[in-house]
Image: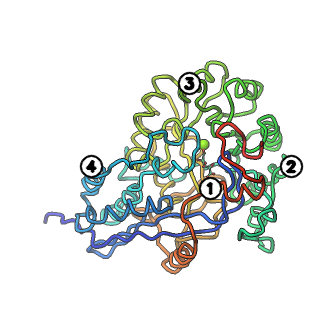
Amino acid sequence: MAFISPVVTDMQVVPVAGYDSMLMTLSGCHEPFFTRNIVILHDSEGHEGIGEIHGGDYTNEALRACIPLVVGQPVIKYRNIMDSIRRNAHRAADDDGEGIQSLDISKLKYVVKSEWAIECALLDLAGQVLGVPMCDLLGNGKQRDQVEVLGYLFYVSDKKKAPDLPYLDESDSDDPWFRLRRQEMLTHERLVEQAKVLHEKYGFRNYKLKGGVLEGSYEMDTVRALKEAFPDGRINIDPNGAWSLEEAIRLCKPMENILTYIEDPTGPEAGYSSREIMAEFKNAVHLPVATNMIATDWRQFYHSAALKSVDIVLADPHFWGFEGTVRLGQLLKDWGLTWGSHSNNHYDITLAAFAQVGCAVPGEPAPMDTHWIWQDGQDLLKDAPKIVDGYLQLPKGNGLGVHLDHDRLKEANDLYNKLSTHDRNDALAMQYLIKDWKYDSKKPCLVR
Ligand code: GKR
Ligand code: MG
């Protein structure tokens, strides 16, 4: 008897918000809340498929516009559905194409591909229909049962300095990490403590420090302190392109035996693009270079590869799609380069999706980024994936392998509906720390 695919019967887009710490980056300071959009699909056999993507009204509207292209379609034709979505997509009038080369966070929404959440939900349905995990539907199929993730370390500011902003206080939690993560952490000692508490909870051995916050030489001393505490650990730092070429070479040359790799050390300067400047950096410093800023799509990747600007492409599926991420991972492996993934704040649905993608990419991925440790406990799933001994575990079920908790989803949607704005604004909290603070892609956020 011929197989007849179930059809998608409905698509919901649910905006949600959760709590965050006062995390510092080049673009400023995280607000007390982060926002995401959740896509929920049902099919004619009663399956539920889910996906998660960045928050904000722009992404929410882009997702809603896709509903007529998804509902009524056979689940198993997910590739054709995605193709029709891409064909119907158009570039926003104020998208200047710069992307996030200078970490101007207002442009992140143009780099994010909203339809990724739909692809995720469709693959979740397709996996359930066919009785296989999502990673079996990608690339060469499942490559592993767990994928390494790194401990994503941040300098954190003192929330008491922004008394009007309702940052969470977890000082009476039983969990040492939950207690620590809402406190001020700006010194080398506090960052080492952060890494040690994370090691105890999740078993991380490898860390990434978010730079672009304090003077580069101070941040390198934090890296040295981390390396001393974890001599066998892979330590890297990501200043999001804040340093000039001269400064990046001066800072990184003495770190060749300490850093495992360096992420986006420089940005555009003196009329040269960041792809050109990073190629010059690589000629001068013997360290592998990673990026999530200069190769966020195929065209940018073409120029980065032609110039040999990067060794590790942190191809976040929210930017590249599932299919695109795994296709890039295959290509990088064949070319002797390395795949990894970038992240922004996210819930456990994205965590499950990272597990599926990370288990489908061939070769030896770089330990994947995840912000989820800063959100752990605010689950939207009944069965959030686990990080054990530094490895994110592939969920056991079919499709995405996890189940939505509708009560938690409603709470997160209620919180979202109480917020006055839905777009990320890293300048707001920053202005409590430094009066009239303005973003400058060449100045660490606390250096003014
Ligand atoms: O979420 O603040 C953040 C990060 O700094 C993010 O904006 C970066 O895009 O994590 C990202 C990175 O690795 O560059
Ligand atoms: Mg980065």
**Label 1 sits on residue:** 371
Q: Can you tell which quarter of the image residue 139 is in?
A: top left
Mark 1 crowdedness (10 Å alpha carbons): few <14, some 14-19, many ≥20? some
Residue 252 appears anywhere in the view: yes
- Residue 206 can be seen in this image: no
Q: Residue at x 76, y 69 (%)?
A: 175
Looking at the image, is mark 1 or mark 2 earlier in the sequence? 2
Badge 3 density bin: few <14, some 14–19, many ≥20, Cα 10 Å = few
Mark in front: 2 vs 4: 4
**CA separation in Å, label 1 and label 2:** 21 Å
In the figure, residue 96 lies in which quadrant? Answer: top left
Q: Is residue 406 above or below residue 265?
A: below
Give the labeled residue for mark 3: 271
Instruction: Identify which amino acid the numbered label 4 is placed on.
Output: Arg
For marks 2 and 3, give the one nearer the viewer. 3
**Image mark for residue 189:** 2
Disc 2 is placed on an element classified as helix
C-alpha separation, residue under disc 2 versus residue under disc 4 = 51 Å
Specify the amino acid type for callout 1. Answer: His
Q: For mark 4, give the secondary structure.
A: helix
Earlier in the chain: of badge 1 and badge 3, it is: 3
| Of residues 197 and 221, the one drawn nearer to the viewer in this rendering | 221
* Ligand 1 contact, mark 1 (Cβ < 8 Å): yes
x then y, percent, for residue 335: 45, 28
